[in-house]
Image: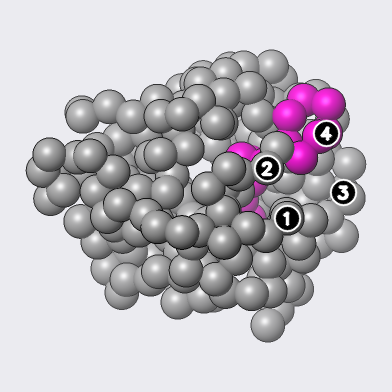
Amino acid sequence: MNKKAFALVLCAMTMTIVFLSGCSSNNGNPNPTHNRYAVITVSGGISGTIKILLYEDKMPVTTANFIRLAQSGFYDGLIFHRIGPTFMIQGGGYDINGTLKQDPYGTINLETSADVTHVDGAISMARTSDKNSATSQFFICVGAQHFLDGNYAAFGVVTEGLDVVHNIAAQPQDNSGGDGTGKPITPIIMSSVTIVDQ
């Protein structure tokens, strides 16, 4: 495992692990082959909108978990707490005060697909060293990160706002990740994460 992959594992290790008792494969989507989108509205140090196509047809467990969290309002007000200009931006776990927000649903098992890889703009689940430990934290790739394929659950891709992702990744940060990544100096907030049909 190279340094970037090891650092990505370590960064999610503070998450408390709770077991997931069940997860709907389509989370109420009347047509699970019709993939929906997530829209992340960003404010704070950067403002803008990121629109992500969710591969519900290819990654049903992972997308259902993300959609359930988004529709419950879990992500609203959380920050991107780790960024790197040539790696990724990560969020979904901490509020603006640096307090960990616990996922109420627990862990999901690692799900992968040869058709969904870590291309530029791919969204994927962060986790601990346990492959089946992902909960709410996710990252969006800045540039292709194919060394993560098969070991992390990529489950969608940015279709609009990739420039916003790259802009977030390039912001000043504290290098606390030890691998060229760290917490943004000026908080970058997910004001809302909504699920839309198109």
**Residue located at (67% from left, 60% from top):** 17
Q: Residue at x 65, y 29 (%)?
A: 78
**Which amino acid type is marked by label 3?**
Asn
Query: Badge 4, how many Cα within 10 Å: few under 14, some, many 20+?
Result: few
Residue 179 left/right relative to 159 = right
The residue that label 4 is drawn on is 98
For the residues labelled 1 and 2, the Cα–Cα distance comes to 7 Å
Magenta segment: does it hold 88?
yes
Amino acid marked by disc 1: Thr
Say which residue appears at 56% left-offset and 31% top-offset.
75
Q: Is residue 113 left or right of residue 68?
A: left
Q: Between disc 3 and disc 2, whose residue precedes?
A: 2
Q: Range of the magenta residues?
A: 87-100
Q: Earlier in the sequence, mark 1 or mark 4?
A: 1
Q: Main secondary structure of the magenta part?
A: loop
User: Is residue 166 found left or right of 155 in the rendered image?
Assistant: right
Closest to the observer: 177 or 18?
A: 18
Q: Are marks 1 and 2 in contact (CB under 8 Å)?
A: yes
For mark 3, what is the residue? 175
Local secondary structure at mark 1: loop
Find the distance from the CA under tag 4 to the CA under tag 2: 12 Å
Labels 3 and 2 touching (C-beta < 8 A) = no
Query: What colour scheme does the image use?
Result: one colour
Question: Which comes sooner in the sequence, label 1 or label 3?
Answer: 1
**Which label is found at residue 16?**
1
Q: Nearer the viewer, mark 3 or mark 2?
A: 2
Q: Tell me, yes or no, whether the two marked residues, 1 and 3, touch with CB atoms within 8 Å.
A: no
Instruction: Give how far across and how far down residue 140 sits, in percent.
Output: 53, 48
Which residue lies under the disc numbered 2? 102
> What separation in Å lies between label 3 and label 4 (alpha carbons)?
16 Å
- Residue 158 placed where, x, y %? 39, 41
- 1 or 4: mark nearer the eye: 1
